Image (cartoon, coloured by chain):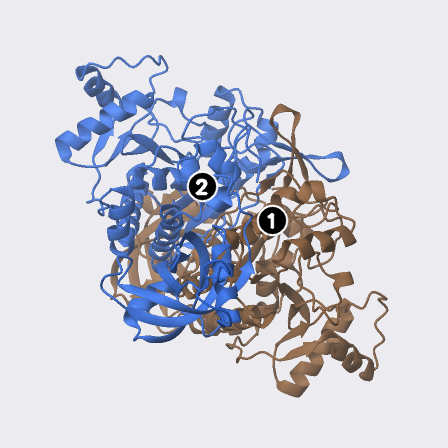
Chain colours: A brown, B blue
Amino acid sequence: MSTRVLVQQLQSLPDGPVSVSGWVETVRDQKKVQFVILRDETGAVQLVNPATRPIDPATASGAGEEQDAAALALTETISGLSTGTFLTVTGELKHDERVKLGGVEVKVGGLEIAAAALAETPIAADSGLDKRMDWRFLDLRQRRNNLIFRVSTTLEHAMRTWWIERDFIEIHSPKLMASASESSAELFEVPYFEDKTAYLAQSPQFFKQMAQSAGFGKIFEIGDVYRADPSFTSRHATEFTSVDAEISWIDSYDDVARMQEELLAFAIGAVADKHGAEIEELFGVTVVAPTVPFPRIPLAEAHEIVTARGYDIPRTDGDLDPEGERQISAHVKEAFGHDFVFITDYPHEIRAFYHMRDAETGLTKSYDLLYNGVEITTGAQREHRVDILIEQAAQKGLDPEHLEFYFDFFRYGVPPHGGFGMGLARVLMLMLGESSIREVTFLFRGPTRLAP
Amino acid sequence: MSTRVLVQQLQSLPDGPVSVSGWVETVRDQKKVQFVILRDETGAVQLVNPATRPIDPATASGAGEEQDAAALALTETISGLSTGTFLTVTGELKHDERVKLGGVEVKVGGLEIAAAALAETPIAADSGLDKRMDWRFLDLRQRRNNLIFRVSTTLEHAMRTWWIERDFIEIHSPKLMASASESSAELFEVPYFEDKTAYLAQSPQFFKQMAQSAGFGKIFEIGDVYRADPSFTSRHATEFTSVDAEISWIDSYDDVARMQEELLAFAIGAVADKHGAEIEELFGVTVVAPTVPFPRIPLAEAHEIVTARGYDIPRTDGDLDPEGERQISAHVKEAFGHDFVFITDYPHEIRAFYHMRDAETGLTKSYDLLYNGVEITTGAQREHRVDILIEQAAQKGLDPEHLEFYFDFFRYGVPPHGGFGMGLARVLMLMLGESSIREVTFLFRGPTRLAP
């Protein structure tokens, strides 16, 4: 293991013996010379081998010509390499500025195949999304797909680092629950022990609030949640990674919004620093850390702006529809040059029962965060006064019996608190200008997609 | 929000006005003076209020004595405070070395109750574990329980940092699967769309291997997994957080073991640095970064050592039982002064089908890692040669049809690879000397435990 050199290290090494490992991207098997493009997780390098072909007796210049058996075998092995075969090559590194791929090549000395690929690759770079998802492990070998998950790693680590430097506690709340965490629709049921039924968490909502009652103060969680959601849009999945935070002793939902905008500015800045050039090259997108504060627009005002732009939102419940979100985001981009906008003060009719309401207006102390025209977050101050909370649950027609355990979190003391939930894949999709969360999810799950 | 001072900051502040927020731990309501111990996520502080009691007309020295209504009300409010009530106090900070609790106290000026707790607290510090789990949000207010999750946060962040500095990619593999990831026993079934059945992942095993086939090179995942495991031991749960890593181009399982020991040495060292003194105080345990390399003992040799210590392992399958694990760990502690030991070279009969086997001995290229006498990890080099892999699956009586999607990961090229899975709660339990993973899990899930 110690002798392996990563492809990206080759340029900085002197000419001489090296060993590289990776998979075959292409083979160019010319009569006199063979070229293999070998890729690993860090890049691609050209391997070169002067071909030694068996002498055709018909054209041999004379009898008795000796051929190097090892050289013959190596040439034959390279001729037989199929795309995707993983192998280790030992050879001579040579710097040569004529080589387009990084100005280096490796003259093959020995070649050891770890696992040969079947000759027929079931997908091509231009295969449709569904076909590519069938063969996701091959699809992920593409350089741009590999980059997506390195970006995701950097984004998450930057968020966690930001939180941890501010003394947040990371929790792992259970995903097996005795009742719904959000709504009884879109709920996966799991037969549990003793004829009980468990439900898969739709969000860590109740439990991140429990952490406030437990006096944890500031918490975050990055974990998978489940929605038995039959929709097939580019923004929905039945299982997705949710980024959640919750903080105590807030005065308003704006304390949550401020935390989130600073978090995102830091994390997107970290992505820009580490991967900006590569994202530019492979996605044609310039990632820049957003400035804070993000613009804030009350929902009612957003409606006026969208209407003034000539779009009539067909929804009658007062919420924005996807085109409305794009319109208000376009306005914000034009007016403030910003990719993000907090839409605030949603009517309680279209919000969860646990959102705190303004006593006078009835509007919730909550926001949605839009990024490049798409909602990525709902955030809110929570109602922590248990009497009002119970009343709000009843107004929504929820069965209080199933919520008793949750109401208990408020009966034994609780600080004012609030938080947000954010879809990791949506952020990645919008940051990279991708068309679907399926492109940026390691293995997507949807109504008709449970494999591989 | 900006004016709140954390309790731990008080000692470094000068005498003067402050505002602290937290929950009531105790009230000492004396006739002439009232003391409240207020706790927040960082510590506890004594609040003091000179009591102003209503004058008993019978004992009043004369008519016309005026009492301060606000002072009377404040005294009455404090008298009525129940344990657990969350409140904000504004007052005067005063340094006084006679105050045992940190040498400071806050003279109450104003007091605002955020949420009053019910008078009867359903659990006490000495309540049994099951009762405490019923009221976990109250149980977590204990200082030592809060510390557990700060330790967990530090441990995880250190591991992630170690990996990310070495260019590992973080993945989130799906927990909804079309087939079992480990064994068909202990599998939770989930009714899915179109009358399909999904299964909850027992581990990310197949998908972290898929990442190797995808050319990711080095990956990790920290996420929840599910076992429909009816056992009630102190080490098992139906849902738990699994720490997983998988790396390519290994020569042997020992490359995995070396990664894991360095990871743990770094992460435990980070815990010792950040929380060592507090762990010592609250758990009576000294946490020290383990030295590397950890001792390694082949399983057959471990058997001999345990037998020589006078313990006959009753299991007939060749594996260690819990007492055998304690015995071999005691030996390692005595002989090498080490808390960790890798037990290696398990017979294939007691290992998963995907463990690579030594062609001559049939022993698997795998290990278990024991920590303070308990298994926390299984690691292995994986069989990446698909023909052998299929054969080994067949030998275990597994239905190849359900594994075709997994075998495909190997048919289109794959590097040699291996990895480990580690239970986060077990590591925490053993590091802190706790008796059960239930104590170190945010919300435990077991056969009879699905709430809160």
Host chain of mark 2: B
Residue A200: in sight, yes or no?
yes
How far across and down, in percent of the image, does residue B23 sit? Answer: 46, 56
Comparing A432 with B10, the one in front is B10
- Amino acid type, label 1: Val
How far across and down, in percent of the image, does residue A115 sit? Answer: 44, 41
Asked if disc 1 and disc 2 are in contact, CB closer than 8 Å, the reply is no
Mark 1 = which residue? A225
Quadrant showing the C terminus of chain B: top right
Kindly identify the residue that appears in the image at 55 percent across and 39 percent down.
B408
Kindly identify the residue that appears in the image at 27 percent across and 25 percent down.
B326
**Location of residue A381 by image quarter:** bottom right
**Location of residue A392 by image quarter:** bottom right
How far across and down, in percent of the image, does residue A326 sit? Answer: 72, 73
Residue neighbourhood size for the residue with mark 2, other residues' Cα within 10 Å, grouped as few (<14), some (14–19), many (≥20): many
Left or right: where B273 falls relative to B237? left
The residue positioned farthest toward the bottom in the image shown: A335
> Closer to the camera: disc 1 or disc 2?
2
Please determine whether, in this image, residue B128 is positioned above or below residue B52.
above
Disc 1, SS: strand
Please determine whether, in this image, residue A309 is positioned above or below residue A226.
below
Disc 2, SS: loop
The residue positioned farthest toward the front in the image shown: B62
Q: Which mark is residue B441?
A: 2
